[in-house]
Amino acid sequence: MPFYVFKNRQRFSTTEIKADWSVCLYLILLILHLTSVSRSEMLQLLGPAGPVIAVVGEDVVLPTHLKPNISAEDMRIEWFRTQNRDPLVHLYLLGESRNESQNPSYSGRTALFPEELRKGNTSLRLSRVQVSDEGQYSCYIQSKSDNNYRIMVSLEVRAVGTEPVIFREADEEGEVGLLCESKGWYPQPDLIWQDSEGHNLTTEKPEILRDSLGLIVIRTRVVIKREGSSRFTCRVLQQKLNDEKVTEFYLHEMKADWSMCPYLILLILHQTSRSEMFQLLGPAGPVIAVVGEDVVLPTHLKPNISAEDMRIEWYRPQNRDPLVHLYLLGESRNEPQNPSYSGRTALFPEELRKGNTSLRLGRVQVSDEGQYWCYILSKSDNNYRIMVSLEVRAVGTEPVIFREADEEGKVRLLCESKGWYPQPDLIWQDSEGHNLTTEKPEILRDSLGLIAIRTRVVIKREGSSTFTCRVLQQKLHEEKVTVFYLHGLQPANQIRAMLVTDQSQRTSRRESSNTVRSRTEHGAGDGEARKARAIASEPAGRRAAPS
């Protein structure tokens, strides 16, 4: 607080201004403290909107970052799995990785991104993915000021198995035994036997085995008669992978017709060259999109030949107007396009020459969720098709509690949260964690298809004074919590209520600074108010800092 002495014709005495430097220093320290608190409250640890998909044997990144993008170089960063006996996956401390206590199964397979730490990137790279890696990972960060943050990332592992192989096991009088086997899958697929008319012949449960890598071997047998159908199909389907592999078996009488041999050889060579020359590939699992943002449905040709002169059609057969995007004769032609996709779809023109046939979908809507087919027709009339599954997500608002009415000895509360997709669960709890929910929640949808959920509870003024409304969405690994404090047994006009929003309580185990909003009616004492704030500021389920 500087002061100035002005020399003028009129005399001015410096003794008239008394500077209290102790007050000035206190105010400066108070401002710095408030600034640091506001910065800690603004800091967030963010992760992906849905599960991360990884393929066995490949590398994957579990993405997390600080917002705003401040440096994490001087922070403690710990990745762990609480469900494991040895939970530590990776530890970064005092500027370096320290993995002496690391779970042995992750040895030599984990790393951060040192050059990205200064930008707030705390992601973990996991190499040579194994089936046992599947599950939930927690990222815990502790700053030098002892503020800590936590978020959970879910990893789902995939593996596409082999083409099914059919073995002819034994012939009995008028019957033939066939065995179908496919290896290297994860998760477990389904195996179905069919005749030439598509009828299901499967009668026994499949035999399931696991190899040394945890991958699944599936096999099943069928006994068929030599009369009737002579073509039998073994199908292996994996819904999560959107993958199907098929092998056909032809049963013929054992009569040699050598005149057909050259024709059959040429036919086999022709079919082999066509099927092995090109492939249309897509993602191993569903693509996750957030409402209002853009998303890419990735597909590409292998090998990377040009698709510029091909017909590329994206469509949804379950829609009344199925066309999503059409590329023909070197340009997009969307006259018959479904109106809901107008102006929101595009290919990547510069990438078509590299075989990239991906579709970009802008401003994602809830109605966009579902299965998309990419169909490609080359100039030589070879055609390829693959399905891509799109899952839409939206995280809703913090729950808001309304005090609706007071009856004799009772209070009625309403909890509401908006903007979710898919539908979450809403639970009322007392201070001991007992479920107070007695009625089904009321579900509403707004004009965008997003969900609003609300439910009521009637509580007595005696007993517990703390009531919690929790909104949980398992697919999003998201939880939002609001706590309502009811104090005193006085008449309604003298009751003081405090509403606390705890933004750190999430299923993703994210822990950030608690934001406390209090509302105190006239007549409440300062001592009681301080006590209530102390209770509210206690982080529920806070994790002790690892040593």
Image (tube, rainbow, N blue to C red):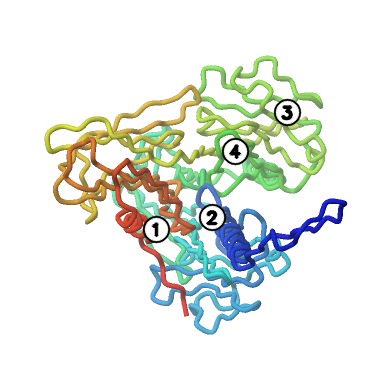
At label 2, the amino acid type is Glu
At label 4, the amino acid type is Ile
The residue that mark 3 highlights is: 311
The residue that mark 2 highlights is: 41
Identify the residue at horizontal 15%, vertical 32% (top origin): 407
Q: Please, what secondary structure does the residue beneath circle 2 have?
A: helix
- Closer to the chain start, of discs 3 and 4, is 3
Q: Nearer the viewer, residue 528 or 220?
A: 528
Say whether residue 497 is visible. Answer: yes
Q: CA distance from mark 2 to mark 4?
A: 46 Å
Residue furthest left as drawn: 408
Foreground mark, 3 or 1?
A: 1
Disc 2 vs disc 4: Cβ atoms closer than 8 Å? no
Q: Residues within 10 Å of mark 2 (few under 14, many from 20)?
A: some
Foreground mark, 2 or 3?
A: 2
Q: Quadrant of the N terminus?
A: bottom right
Q: CA distance from mark 3 to mark 4?
A: 14 Å
